[in-house]
Every structure is written in C-alpha cells, then in structure tokens.
Image (cartoon, coloured by chain):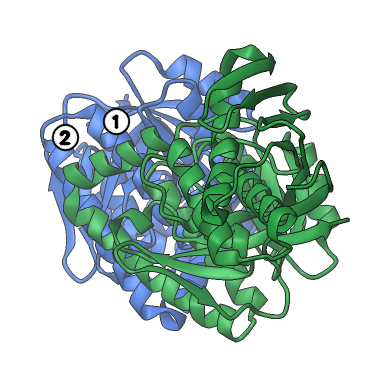
Chain colours: A blue, B green
Amino acid sequence: MPGQVGPVVASAPAKVILFGEHFVVYGVPAIVAAIDLRARARISRRDDELIRIRAPDLGISGSFSQDGHFLPELGREGAEGTLKPIFIAVREVLRSLGVSSGLDVEVRSSIPIAAGLGSSAAVAVSTAAAVHWLLSRRLDRELVFNAALEAEKLVHITPSGVDPAISTYGGLLRYTKGVGIEHLKAPGQLELVVGDTGLKRSTGALVSAVRALRDRRPSRFSSILEAAMELVAEALQALGRGDLEALGELMDVNHGLLCSIGVSNEALDRLVHSARRAGALGAKLTGAGGGGCMIALVEPGMGQDVARAIEEAGGRAFLAKLSLEGVRIEAAP
Amino acid sequence: MPGQVGPVVASAPAKVILFGEHFVVYGVPAIVAAIDLRARARISRRDDELIRIRAPDLGISGSFSQDGHFLPELGREGAEGTLKPIFIAVREVLRSLGVSSGLDVEVRSSIPIAAGLGSSAAVAVSTAAAVHWLLSRRLDRELVFNAALEAEKLVHITPSGVDPAISTYGGLLRYTKGVGIEHLKAPGQLELVVGDTGLKRSTGALVSAVRALRDRRPSRFSSILEAAMELVAEALQALGRGDLEALGELMDVNHGLLCSIGVSNEALDRLVHSARRAGALGAKLTGAGGGGCMIALVEPGMGQDVARAIEEAGGRAFLAKLSLEGVRIEAAP
C-alpha cells in the first residue's frame, strides 16, 4: 500500500428521541430524529500498522495495535475505555475490506457526551465512514452501520441499533422492540432546541426504576402505557401531515406521562417550562431523564428566544434542526 | 325575642383535594380532606332586623334586610357579591328555625381565597353554625350543611356539595359524580404543606380545556383516565393502611397525570419540586391547576423545611394538618 495519504473527514449526526423513551422497553414504538449536531472524524494513513486515536476535545489519545493492544499517550485513566469503541469501528471496516493499515484518527464532536444524544454512535459512524472512504473511495452505509453497531456493543450491552442507524442514515426512524427499525418519511423541517441540564444520570438505574414501578403497579402502568401508545400513533400522524402545533402539544403530553412514571426531575422541568414560556410549540425531556437533556420544538427561525430562555434557566442550549442527511464525507483528498 | 346577646363564634375548616381533581368530572372518585386552616364567624344579635355582615380581612361590609335588599357600607365595588352568600347561609338558618332576627356577622379567615381551598364554603358553614347556635343552642350539622350548600349555589352554579360537606363534617371524604359523598375513615394523621402560587386561575376555563382535550383525543384521554382510576383506588388502600410513603408516591404520580392533561404550570411545578427536594413524601397541584395551590405530604413534624422551601421558591406556604373535626363552636356566652 502507498504511504500516508488523506486526510479524509466524515461527519455524522446526533440523535434525539422525539417520542416514546422508556415506554419503548414495553413495546411502544419510539420516534427518533437525527439532528445537525455532528461528530467529525479525520483519518489519514500511517506508515506503521498502529491505529492512533486522538480525541483532543477530551484531552485523550493513544494507539492500538491491529490486534487491539493499547498504548496510552494522554489521559491514561479511562482513555482505553473511551477510545476502544472507536478502534472497534476502525477494525470492523479494515476486516470487511480484508486489509490492515495503520491510521491516524482524530475525532471531534459538538454533541454533549453522556447526555442521551448518541454521541458515541456518531463518533463511531463518522470514523467508520472516513476509514472506509480513505481505503475504498466508497461510502457503504450498511457497512458503516454494522461497524458502528459493533462499537456500540462496548458502550451499551445490548444496543438497539437505533443510535448507529439514525447517525448513519439521518432523518427519522421508528424503533419498535422485537420489530426493529423502520425509516420514516421526514416532514419538511423540524427545528428543535436541545437543552442540557448538565446533570449526569444513569440510564440503567432509571430503566430499572421504571421496571420496578411496572412490577409493583402493573395495572396503573399498563394504562399509562396505553396512553403512550396512543400518543405515539398520534405523533406519527402529525409528522405525516407536518403539523408542528400538534407535535408540540404531543411533546407536552409525552413529558407529562414521563413525569407520571417518575423519570423527570426539577432541572428538566425548569428547562421545559422556560422553553414553553419562551414560545416553544412543546417541550419534553429526551432520553432516560433524571438529568441529561430536554428538547423543545420551535417554529422555523424561532429557536433563539427559546435557547436564551433555556440558558437563563441554567441549561446549555443547542439549536438543532432535523438532519435529513446521515453520515457524510466532508473532505477527501 | 330578647335583645342583643352573644357573641357566638364558630369555625370551619378548609379543604384540599388529595386525589382525583379534573378526573372526577369523568367518573373517577376524588378524595378530599379537611385541613386545619379555618374560617371564623362571630355572630351577635341586633336590636333591629338587619343582617349586617363585615369581612374586615377584605375591607368590606354592608347590611341586608330580611328580604335580601343590600345596603353597602365599605368596599362598594363587588361587596354585595362577596357578602351575599353569607347572607344566604344566615337566611337559610333563620328560615329553618322560623324566626327573623337582626344579626351582626363578622367573618375572618386564614384560608387563601379563590385558591381552590373551599374558603367560601368554610365561611358559609361557620356562619350558619354560629347563627344556629346563637338562636337554638344546638349544632345541627345537617342543617348547617344545607344552609351552606344554598350559599354555595351563588358561588358555583352547580356545586357538588363537597366543599360544604368537608367543612361541616371534617375528616376525609370520597366524592363520585352521580354517586355522591361518602365519608371515609381517616388515618391517624396527615400533615400537609399547602403552597399558594398566588396566581389566579379560572376553574371553568381549565375544566373546559380538559373537556376539549377529551373530545379531541378520546382514546388517549380514556387511557389516562384509567390510570387515574387505578391511582385513586391505590390511594384509598394506602389511606386505609395509613401508608404515608405510598400516599406520597401516589401524589407524585397524580401530579404527572395532571401534567399530561395540561393543567399544571411552571409556578406549580416549581413549588412541587421545591417541596420534594426539601423532603416531602410527595407533592401535587390541588384543585383546578393553572395557578392556585399545590400540596405536599410530609412526615409528622417535618413541615417547616418544606414550607421554607416553598417560600424560597416564591410561594406562600401554610402548614395544614388533616382536621378530623369539621365545624365547631369556639365561644358562646
């Protein structure tokens, strides 16, 4: 193989759950959207066989041998755990092409991490796509998805595949447990504001708490679940007709149902109310709750006021449009 | 009849809805408690036949002739409307006794008005009881209830009778539309903190908005209604065993369901969260929502912290125990 060429830069979007988090565990479909907060991977060839990975935003770097042995550089503590999924994504692409090549990988991201926005999947997807392009001049989305899904198995024990799917393909999807992923026709445009409480939460603990509630109060829980099922059906119809007002109202209702199963908290409710007060069409927590992020749906072009209100209420706000495009090659030699 | 004697003082408690507001319109039972915030009426005879009523807390006073003609004194604007229900309560007692007597009526109350706490009923009940005692030396609760119910018909077009019933008899009751009022065995003690947002709201407008939601989304609404029905059944069980922790959790769930039908707001949620954060066992809006009051259930003796948190969050807080006693005669010559 020739010496170092490149770099190739690929980017991939973050995700938000528009409707159905938590209830998805019990069979309610979740509606998930790609948003234009992106992770970027920059890849170039090396003369040796090392996969050197740098995440300058996190101040960590290190190298993996082709067989996965880790040589730390910066940010020893936890560096291997953070970089390993990225290495797995690279390794899967190399395997599928039947080559072994040394690579320099640099990842950067504007996606809040550990906030339920699919940051790790977006990093893996952008990395796999850039590596594949560098080595084959093709963007094979299925291959990229599968490589990122392998990487996700290190992050989540049994990943649903939703995060790498939405990051690879963009747009909107419906995920139903036991059925899988269906891509949805996206409405013209959706403009969201993501508000990050900055509070860490444990998805696992929240999912367990909801399960305990279900086991303790099956009858009440199943009524709430039915309401959630109706709500997602209504949301699919509203998306189909591009009815933003209905979508906003349904987000408010979904937030209420999530409150009734105990997964919201004070910080999330504060950001949700600040967004509604500032004119959002609707607002809800997104993801596991108990911290992490909320989202607000806004009229096109009206995100700034809502973002300001969220910041004033103590959150970090990000304007985020629906990203119809999934992973893409940004630059190639 | 002899000349002026008295005064007789009677007091009657306020009410809070513990569970089931709004859903009660659609057949879910509501659980209502008397709390020891009280209205007081002080009655003495006059030598003439006027019913002179003073509400010094509100800065209004005026006199009614026996046939209901109003002679204003202080606070002309709206004074007649405010004082008329009190006159009706007096008139009903006089009618039932077959007498016509001039009376001086002074009402005072520690119950926030127009906040969903049954202030008008407590005033009418305490007035009717004091008048009845003054003229007959008896406290006939059924007569008092009926007199106050007549007064309530001026305040609410079709009163359920819940407010005068709880204020007359105290304790706990279950009200089911189409079934009526059933008194419940009260648990040992309930300590609540009432938080008043200070925001006025229109019960009628909120009830109408919920009805519009029901008409627009009958299927989703009926699932939420079923969850509310389960919840009230659980609450009755928890009350039966005096299980404060379960009651607190159920209050949180009930608040979530009220959020999902859109009747909470930012101020209520802020007070609810402040109470939970300060150690309340549970917290929810009480009454119509959209302003008005919330309640928090606390461990016995732990109300001060929660009250302070509610005040810091911008509300007015009132410690309020379950009042097993309804109307009572406080002083009589």
Dot 1 crowding, Cα within 10 Å, few <14, some 14–19, many 20+: many
Q: Which mark is residue A322?
A: 1
Q: Give the camera-side residue of A140 and A118.
A: A118
Q: Quadrant of the C terminus of chain B?
A: bottom right
Residue A95 in view in this figure? no
Quick check: marks 1 and 2 in contact, CB under 8 Å?
yes
Badge 1 amino acid: Leu
Q: Earlier in the sequence, mark 1 or mark 2?
A: 2
- The residue carrying mark 2 is A186
* Residue occupying the point 53% across, 40% down: B88
* Residue occupying the point 76% across, 36% down: B46
Instruction: Classify residue B187 as left or right of residue B29.
Output: right
Badge 2 amino acid: Ala
Measured as percent of width and height from the top left, residue A77 is found at 72, 58
Q: Give the camera-side residue of A226 and A111.
A: A226
Instruction: Classify residue A211 as left or right of residue A191.
Output: right
Chain of the residue under the numbered disc 1 shown in the image: A
- Report the residue that reaches farthest toward the front: B1
Look at the numbered disc 2 and give the secondary structure of its residue. Answer: loop
Give the image quarter of residue B228: bottom left
Residue B132 in view in this figure? yes
Look at the numbered disc 1 and give the secondary structure of its residue. Answer: loop
Give the image quarter of residue A187: top left
Give the image quarter of residue B157: top left
Measured as percent of width and height from the top left, residue B6 is found at 84, 48
Q: CA distance from mark 1 to mark 2?
A: 9 Å
